[in-house]
Amino acid sequence: MSDIISVLILFVVGAIAAFINVNAGGGSSLTLPALIFLGLDASVANGTNRVAIIFQNISAVYSFKKEKYYELKNSLILSALSLPGAIAGAIFAVRISDEAFEKVLGIIMILLIITILIPQKREKKVTDEFKVDWKLILSMIAIGFYGGFLQVGVGFIIMALLHNLLKLDLIRVNMHKVFIVFVFTIPALLVFILSNNVNWFYGLSLSAGNAFGGWWGAKLSVRKGEKLIKAVLVVAIFIMALKLLNIF
């Protein structure tokens, strides 16, 4: 396969995956198989995918800011809490092949759909009021570990946490999510770089698509509101759950 065709494949897959990631999660379940299809080992594909995740979330953060959705203080707090877990997760990153674990994860994804769709009474939150308790600290460390370890589906978990624990609307959830993933992906990517598990040509090709998809996904997230986010979220989680349960 020529380099031009590979670049085109990665751009298209990256754009679609980033749109899904910004509005829901699970986009890496498209990009990782694409990288492996193009000849990368699983560990190199895992590391190469992190390059695109960085660019995707820089673009999405910028897009949310342009749409007047930007709470730097709160995003930094949440991101900082995820860093210890992300570093530990990246260091111990291995290819997950445990069939039982995949089935449990598939069931969890379906449960996430239910929790997100259940109507909740949410108080109007003030931007500079942010309560950090032990539940939030442990949850963010766990999210960071999973994100550094595997990445696939971490967006679902972040959305469920911020939506249910902090009672945030889904637009603000996505605004914080892209910032958190950007921050904890930096140390994870460094671990993959130092262990020589990054293909820069494919990584930058994928990054172009991810950056475009991340920018456009953030704009639509704000302009179309929670209805679009919920629709993309439910479909993405359902498809990933069926895949994890080996239904297709």
Image (cartoon, rainbow, N blue to C red):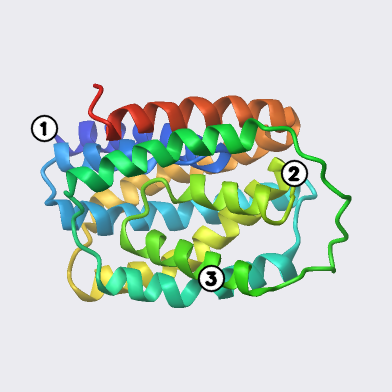
Q: Which mark is residue 208?
A: none
Cβ atoms under marks 2 and 3 closer than 8 Å: no
From the image, which quarter does the C terminus lie in? top left
Instruction: Name the N-terminal-most of marks 3 and 1.
Output: 1
Mark nearest the camera among 2 and 1 is 2
Instruction: Name the N-terminal-most of marks 2 and 3.
Output: 3
State the image coordinates of residue 184 (x, y, percent, origin top left): 47, 67
State the image coordinates of residue 65 (x, y, percent, origin top left): 72, 53
Distance of label 2 from label 1 (alpha carbons): 44 Å
Determine whether, in the image, residue 206 is placed left or right of residue 71: left
* Residue at numbered disc 2: 169
Q: Which mark is residue 138?
A: 3
**Structural crowding at the residue carrying mark 3, measured as other residues with C-alpha within 10 Å and reported as few (<14), some (14–19) or many (≥20):** some
Instruction: Name the N-terminal-most of marks 2 and 1.
Output: 1
User: Could you tell me how many numbered marks the image carries?
Assistant: 3
Is residue 220 positioned above or below 215 on the image? above
Is residue 127 positioned above or below 101 on the image? below
**Structural crowding at the residue carrying mark 1, measured as other residues with C-alpha within 10 Å and reported as few (<14), some (14–19) or many (≥20):** few
State the image coordinates of residue 16 (x, y, percent, origin top left): 43, 31
* Residue at numbered disc 1: 1
Amino acid type of the residue tagged 3 in the rendering: Leu
State the image coordinates of residue 9 (x, y, percent, origin top left): 28, 31
Amino acid type of the residue tagged 2 in the rendering: Asp
